Structure formats: structure tokens, C-alpha cells
Amino acid sequence: MVNQISRTDSLATQVFSLVTVAVMISSSYLLYMQDVEEMDYDMRVPVWARNQQPFDTTQSYSFVLQQGPYERMGAADSWEALEHVMIPYNLPETEGGAAVDPQCVLNFDPDKCPHISLAYWRPEVPSGMKVPVIAEIGPYFGEESAGTADITTPGSWLGVGILQNLLPHGFAFAQVSVSGTGLSNHCMDLMGFSEQEGINAAVEWLGTQDWSNGNVGLIGKSYDGSTPWQAAMYGNEYLKTIVPISGLIGVRELMWKNGSSEARAPFMHNVVYGSYGFSSEKEDENLQNACQDYLLGPIHATNGYVFAGNEFVESYWSERYFLDRVLNNYRGSIYIVQGFHDWNVDPHMAVPTINTLLDHGIEAKVLMGQWDHDYPDRPDYQKDRSDPGRGSEAYPEMVRFDWMQDLLEWFTYYLQEKGPKPSLYLEIQNNRGEWRVEERYPATDSKTVEFDLGGNLTLIEEGGFGTTVYPGMEAVDDWIVFETGTFDYDFRFGGLPQLHLQVTPQGSGGSLYAYMEDCSADNECIHVGHAIMDLRYHEGGTDYQTVIPGVEITAKMEFFAMDILIPEGHYIRLSLRDIGEDYLPSSTEAAVDIELGEDSVLRLHEINVGNKIFFEPPVCMHEDCLEE
């Protein structure tokens, strides 16, 4: 019989906590409104009061509450950019490509030298008024399959919304093609030095135009959410804020987790993004693509797989790691947007990155909901990409129709330097749809709850697939399965759960994969999170370890970020095997014995709900949200 997991808090205590939270919200809102009246400034809307505002929640993306006073310069019946320019920048000859093109070096044709393609739109403002610039930088401009015919057409995924909502409030908008894509020449450098230099040149240009107030902000998703991190490394005086949406803090960090390689890792450079360079509209593209990193990228990725992400040529990866240089050089603000179920850019790009930024004194916030590789305000995409255990339980509450208003308030303060300062609290949504405010994430006031394998995490069944429970039992299936008892209250936990296992590899490596589920009384289970580890990284982090066959080690596994509510009457199931999800088996795959006992423990961090502000966003009235 499984044990019952109980909580000492009485029902009265829980009710009191909820009432306290309600009072906190009401009091905070009244104080806020008093401040607004004193400042005679009505744009700022606190997050817990936004569901009381007249947001349009019927569209396919979000809109600001009030339209701005400025028209867009240029033809009113056309979305075409006001101007398209080519920005030259310098590269050392060691970068190859355009930097060594004979027609550039001998000055026969300066257009063959490195240059970046940029298009921009401006608001029609009074003479002498200067405006800040919001820019998106990426490889997709000129890719019709991505939704834009060329750089002078605003991207349907983001650019159109910015032109509709933010430009009328006094912001210019720009789109920039990274090197080797669109009309930008040189190599497709996959976030390397050449690309970084081109990005910085674009920021410099935007900040120094006579119509610019000198403040530049970058925004974008995925690859376009990684370029803001690259720009921030330079500490450029014109870059005041970045909004990375599912962006990378490093390329190796995208492909490897605890030494385990994603299946796409060996192919990302030339096969996936390298083709963008050859599809660009430029002559002599073979010569322009003759760059060392472009040619050797697949080799680095393959070696990375063989050596679990540990490279003999470390410079390739260190050149493409951004976070440390951001911490050292950047003086602006950062607004991270990330989905807990992002299948493309995993949430460890945002967590614990957000706490690291705060610890370094950077003004930062995060918005994390239960969507996957999406923007936070897209009801149709979010619904289509949400399955049971992968976000659907949080739909439609995950749709944030107040997001464009949030961006307006953010950019108004950090780029126009006016208005009240945005609150830098963190907005977190759990897998059952609840939103709350945190000061840090993972939270510092959580209670640690531990479950030891074979104790209050009961062994249910065991199987092969190269992994056995010490000292070895008969195989049942491909999984080793453990279960907690049922919870007699709603158990909320979040952040970065840990699974520390005492294991004995039978070879010079091996890997472990952990899969966590929420199971009901009738044994219906949904995914809540997973973890992966190549045992050559058993200490955690990025330090490569030597594994000796037959010698016991502690595998310090950490789950991808999650925020979970296990309903009353449900229990947690933990399943272990050697590999799972989209990861490749370890190149040193071997059987692994797992020891039960108090030294093998699942560690969860229970949310202190009595000390949190919960809130509801504006109610989605889009047709997808209303369908049952």
C-alpha cells in the first residue's frame, strides 16, 4: 500500500492564505492607482489589474490599449520600408570570406567587402523630435517560407505587430539580416565572430543617425532572440535594452545538456543554417562563404558529440558563448520571454539565467508560460502546439493579450526614458494555468521536499535497456519506475528539480534519462518534466569527468525548468532509462547500476503559496480559446 503524503497546513490556514493574497492584490492596486493619479500618467497598468482593462482579446495577437498619435512615414497603403541601406564593417583577414575577397582587398569593388543589410521604418513626428529604434536581427529576412519576401517587408511574425502598435507611439523599427543571409554578404557564421561584428555595426549605425535619439532596443524569437544576447556582449553605449524570446545564451548550450547531445547537434551549422548563405542574392557566393568556421562547423559538432560537448578546439564554442561577456560588459536592461515547453530552445536558457542577471545588478525580468517555441500572445499557435502534459492544461490562460502593452511600457521607459519604471517582478505560470509573481526564479523561499529511491519513492517495476537497479533484478520493460504516495493537498513545486543518483557505470561512460509524470487515481498520467545526463558530466555543469568502469559516482542530475501543480489525490511517477526525448545515446554508452537508498534522492522545491500574488491575465475571447 502506498503511503499518503500529507500537509500540516489546515484548511483554515489555506483559506487565510488565499484571503491574504487577495488583500495584497487589492491593496497594491489601490496604491498603484494613487501613484498614477499623482503622476497624471495613465499608460502603466499593473499586471494583476490588466484583466480589468479593455484589451482586444479576439485577435490572433495582442494590441496596446491605446493607439499612438503618430503615422508611419511613407505610403499609407504600403508596408514597404522607408529605406534600405547596406552598412559596411571591418573584419580581420583571418575570418576569410568577404574579408579576403580580392575585389575587396584591392579596392576594385567595396561592395564585395563585409556589409550588413538593414531596412527601417520611422514615425512621422514633429520636426526636431528624435526617436529610439526597436530592431529585429536574424537570418530569415528574404525567406518567403519564413513569412517575408525580403528585408524591406515587415516580418508577419513580429514586425507587423510592432509597426501597428509601437511605431505610432514614437518608435522607429528596423530589420537586419545577419552575415551571409538575405542581402548581407560574407559567411553564414552561425552566431560566430563575423556575425557578432555585423550585429554591433548595425546597433552603432542605428544609434548614430540624425533622426535617432541614440537609444536602441533589440527583440526577436529563436535565432532572432539570440542576436540580442550577441549585441549585449559589446557593451555598446547605444544598446539600452534587449528582449530575447527563446534566445540562446550560447550555441553549445542549445545542443548539449549535461553532456548529452541533441540529435540535431551535428547538423546545425551547414545543413540547417549554412544553406541560408547560399540562398542569398549575391554573386561569387562560394568565395564569400570560404570561412574557416563555416567549413569546420560540422566537424566541431561531430567532435562535440563524441566527447560529450567537450572540445579539443574549445575556441569554437567559447566564441559562441554570450552570457559571461554580457555580465561583464552590458549596462542595459533585459526582458526574457520563454516557454516551459519549448521543444527548440530549452528553458535552461532562461532559468537560472534570470537569477544570474539579477545577482550581477542587471535590471531584468522574465515572462514564462506553458507554451512551447511561441510568442506569448498567439492563441492559435499555442493551441495547435499544446498536447496533454505539454501545455494544454494551461490553455487558454497561457495566452497573454497584455503582452504588447507590456512591451510598450518597457520600451517607453528604457528607450524613450519617460513614464514610470516597469516592475521587474517575474511572471511565472504553472502547468495548470495559474499565474503568479516571483522576485527570483527559482524562488528563494521554497521549501525543499526530498524523496529517496526505494523509500518514499517506491520502486514499482524495473527493466533493461542498459540500466539496472543495484544489485540487479529481473527485467520487466525498458523503464525503471518509481512512485510517490498520493498527495492530500495541491502540491506546487517549481524551478530546477534535482535528481542525485548513486550509480556504478559498467563502462567508461553511459547516460541517464529521467521522466517525471503527474498521475491520477485511475492511473492516467501526463508529462511534467524530464532530465538528461551523459555520465562524463556527472558532477553537473560543464566540467568533463573521467568515468572508470566499476567505480561508483554520484550523478547530479538537474531537470529542465518546470512549474507544476500536482492536484490533491494525484501522485508523482519517476521513470529512468538510458536515453529519451530528442537526444542521442552517449558515444560511450554502457550499462549503469543504480543504488537505492537515501543517497539517491529526488529533490523538489515546494512553492510558498502563502507569500505569492496570483493573478489572471485578460480573458482570451479568440475563437480558438472558446472552442471546447
Image (cartoon, rainbow, N blue to C red):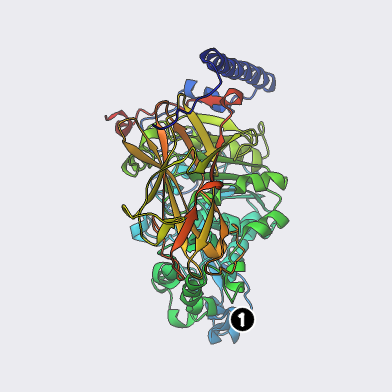
- Give residue 611's position: percent from left, percent from top: 61, 25
Instruction: Please indicate whether residue 329 sits to the left or right of residue 512 in the image.
Output: right
The crowd level at tag 1 (other Cα within 10 Å; few <14, some 14-19, many 20+) is few
Q: Is residue 607 above or below residue 384?
A: above
Task: Please provide percent x and percent y for residue 2.
Answer: 41, 32
Residue 337 visible in image: yes
Viewed as shown, does residue 332 lie left or right of 265? right
- For the residue pair 518 and 571, the one nearer the viewer reads as 571
**Residue in front for this viewpoint, 122 or 96:** 96
Q: Quadrant of the N terminus?
A: top left
How many numbered discs, if any? 1
Image vertical order of residue 561 relative to residue 437, above or below: below
Q: Nearer the viewer, residue 317 or 129?
A: 317
- Residue shown at the point (56%, 85%) measured from the top left: 108
Rendered residue at 60%/66% (across/down): 545
For the point 45% across and 40% down, the residue is: 376
Q: Position of residue 366 (x, y in %)?
A: 57, 41
Give 5 or 166, whichever is nearer the viewer: 5
Q: Residue furthest left?
A: 628
The quarter of the picture where residue 285 lies is bottom left
Give the structural element (helix, strand or loop) at label 1: helix
Vertical placement of 124 versus 32: above or below? below
**To which residue does mark 1 refer?**
94
Question: Which residue is at a point 31% across and 35% down the rendered structure image?
Answer: 523
Whether residue 177 is visible:
no
- x and y percentages locating residue 129 in the rendered image: 64, 43
Specify the quadrant that holds the C terminus.
top left
Q: Is residue 593 above or below residue 68?
A: below
Which amino acid type corresponds to the residue marked 1 in the rendered image?
Answer: Thr
